[in-house]
Amino acid sequence: MKKPTNAGLEFKSREAIEKDQVGRLRNLIKYVSQKSPFYKRTFARKGITYSDIKSIKDVQKLPITTKAQLQRYNRDFFAVDRCDTAEIVSTTGTTGEPVFIAMAKGDLDRLALNEARSFYCAGANNEDIFDIAVTLDSLFMAGMAYYLGIIKLGALAFRVGMHNIKKHVHLIRKLKPTGIVTVPTFLVKLADGIKEEGFDPKALSIKKALLVGESIRDRDFNLNKLGSLITTSWPIELYSTYGNSEGAISFCECQEHIGCHEHPDLIISEILDEKGRIVPDGELGELVLTTLQIRGMPLLRYQTGDITFKITEKCKCGRNSSRIGPILGRKAQMMKLKGVKVYPKIIENAILNVDGVSNYVIEALTGNDFSDKRIVKIGSKRKSEKLRERVCKHIKAHAKVTPLVELVSVNEVEYLKTDGGTRRKPRLFVDKREKTQSLKGPLYDR
């Protein structure tokens, strides 16, 4: 099948990729210095111009953009007028005030192109049929992006969402999709639902799944417990993806499954340490994104808050585009316990290896000595001291610390994860730590 537009750039040399990115970055700086009120002020204050960019390393001369700035000055990041805005989407608000994102018509085309390339990267083509089992309403960008990408690729899509397992089973049998786009935990539920309806998942038409929102791989790219749980009952090929709404971008694994590829003419990625310095390949740091070819709300060096690592060596698939590893945590969720840095994701992966755990939630609190404390609440149908000890042992082995583990009811954990059913996106980490700094003042509105 013909590659999606400009996907061939990913197979060119690193030098060719960086030359393309430098030209696009200079154009971006010209654009935001004229169209984005926030960056126009910032550049005037710092004396930045597009002529400062002569190599890809010069991206480090540009200012960092934070989530707090997006939340406080949201409308000042809009670079198009109302008449040029085709769509408004938003973040979930799981880390504070939701951010609204203006998308021009061309941004929707770019979003479709990005996803078409990601599906192509995962071996999809125009003969595929995809069951889209993610949220497609509530200003949610990702569901719309997957749908547009599948159509752009020339494949067929049907939109079911994440509800009604029986309807999914019925449509899978009738429409015979070859692939599915969903979150890993829903795929586990779907496999169970297929069996309850009296069918064998292995005998159905679905052969691959593009999975979003939750990690299915460990740092070494092997499947974690959640990924293994899926393939045990439903041996289909799993593709891990990473998406960021603010950057209107996604990264996707190729068929080698050794990192998620970026599309270099659409994004520039960096991995930075706590002091804002580039870290070497393979070292953990925060993913920072600079968007290319966006008109509605372009961003420079946006701190995603996601902890991962970068790989720049050529992939076995032939692509020279950079890759990122699995998301191993959130910067804001990092806890320092007895001098050890611990991310909730590491604790989550440890819990997934324990039989008898129905669900869980991790709480972080500030102790009387102002140090970080953590409570792991395990939902289980049988409360036994042996189960609690096994959970502690697995967390100790993975995270090098021993947490306080409480066994509670399954319903209590579900209540905590959803704030009593009020949250659109369930959370596995609840941060109750005292904040030493807070953002003051009203939301700045242009």
Image (cartoon, rainbow, N blue to C red):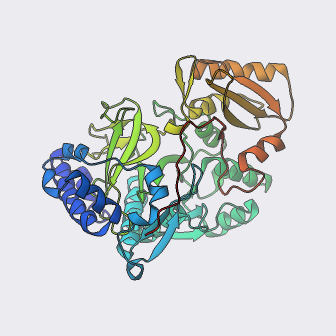
**Residue 12 relative to residue 415: left or right:** left
The picture places residue 257, in percent across and down from the top left corner, at 43, 41
Which residue: 47% across, 42% down? 306
**Residue 33 relative to residue 392: left or right:** left
Of 130 and 201, nearer the camera is 130
Which residue: 47% across, 74% down? 87
The answer to whether any part of residue 384 appears in the image is yes
**Residue 259 relative to residue 416: left or right:** left
> How many labels sit on residues?
0
Above or below: residue 351 compared with residue 105: above
Quarter of the image where one finds residue 411: top right
The picture places residue 139, in percent across and down from the top left corner, at 56, 67
- Tell me the quadrant of the picture where the N terminus can be found: bottom left
Q: Which residue lies furthest to the front in this view?
A: 441
The picture places residue 68, in percent across and down from the top left corner, at 47, 50
Of 409 and 239, nearer the camera is 409
Which residue: 54% across, 35% down? 223
- Tell me the quadrant of the picture where the C terminus can be found: bottom left
The answer to whether any part of residue 123 appears in the image is no
Q: Residue furthest bottom?
A: 83
Of 74 and 101, nearer the camera is 74
The picture places residue 60, in percent across and down from the top left corner, at 25, 43
Which residue: 79% across, 57% down? 197
